[in-house]
Image: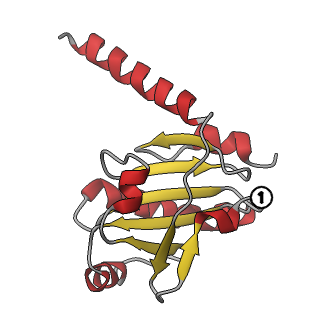
């Protein structure tokens, strides 16, 4: 298959997955954070937009995106957006060791058995989901949702 065809197929799939996500409600979940506190997605509904970021410590692209998220922390907070970093299927101790290398203020949650990543159909890492205040999925992809995020942010 020629490179142009592969690119076109990738573009179409990416576009339609983003469009289809706009019609769906984000499934609720409850996960534990670093302090063993339960965090539910439903607790943000009606209050603020949420970015879910699924990642692992061994993923080099996840590290790149974590650095990008760290640089956006203040901007995201000012816009009233909550970022939840959801680690997939790793032990808390390993994640805590990894996080010593980063200065993160976002909540880190543990999806130890992969239940939530399965619920969201995560098929590669890193994966972002942008959820608006009403709990609707507005984006799913492997890069920060710049265009979609700008549409939700106050001008």
Give whichever of 150, 9 is nearer the camera.
Answer: 9
Q: Which residue is drawn at 32% across and 82% down?
A: 92
- State the quadrant of the C terminus: top right
Is residue 29 shown above or below 26? Answer: below
Image color mode: secondary structure
Position of residue 24 measured from the top left corner of the image (x, y, whole percent): 59, 39
Q: How many C-alpha atoms fall within 10 Å of the one at disc 1: few (<14), some, or many (≥20)?
A: few
**Which residue matches tag 1?**
46
Position of residue 38 measured from the top left corner of the image (x, y, whole percent): 53, 80
Residue most extreme to the left: 1
Position of residue 107 measured from the top left corner of the image (x, y, whole percent): 53, 74
Position of residue 33 measured from the top left corner of the image (x, y, whole percent): 47, 80
Is residue 97 shown above or below 129? Answer: below
Give whichever of 29, 6 is nearer the camera.
Answer: 29
Q: Which residue is drawn at 44% across and 45% down?
A: 143
Is residue 40 shown above or below 51? Answer: below
Residue 116 found in image quarter = bottom left
Residue most extreme to the bottom: 35
Residue 146 found in image quarter = top right
- State the quadrant of the N terminus: top left
Q: What element carries label 1?
A: loop
Q: Residue at x 40, y 44 (%)?
A: 142
Is residue 55 shown above or below 31? Answer: above
Q: How many marks?
A: 1
Give whichever of 142, 34 is nearer the camera.
Answer: 34
On the rendered structure, is 36 left or right of 146?
left
Q: Residue at x 34, y 79 (%)?
A: 101
């Amino acid at each position: 298959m020629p490179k142009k065809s592969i690119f076109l197929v990738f573009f179409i799939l990416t576009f339609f997955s983003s469009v289809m996500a706009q019609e769906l409600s984000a499934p609720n979940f409850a996960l534990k954070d670093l302090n063993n506190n339960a965090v539910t997605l439903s607790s943000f509904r009606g209050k603020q937009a949420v970015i879910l970021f699924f990642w692992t410590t061994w993923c080099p692209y996840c590290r790149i995106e974590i650095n990008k998220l760290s640089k956006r922390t203040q901007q995201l907070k000012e816009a009233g957006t909550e970022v939840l970093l959801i680690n997939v299927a790793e032990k808390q101790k390993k994640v805590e060791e990894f996080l010593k290398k980063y200065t993160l203020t976002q909540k880190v949650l543990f999806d130890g058995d992969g239940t939530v990543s399965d619920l969201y159909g995560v098929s590669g890492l890193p994966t972002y989901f942008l959820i608006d205040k009403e709990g609707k999925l507005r984006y799913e992809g492997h890069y920060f949702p710049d265009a979609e995020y700008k549409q939700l942010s106050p001008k």
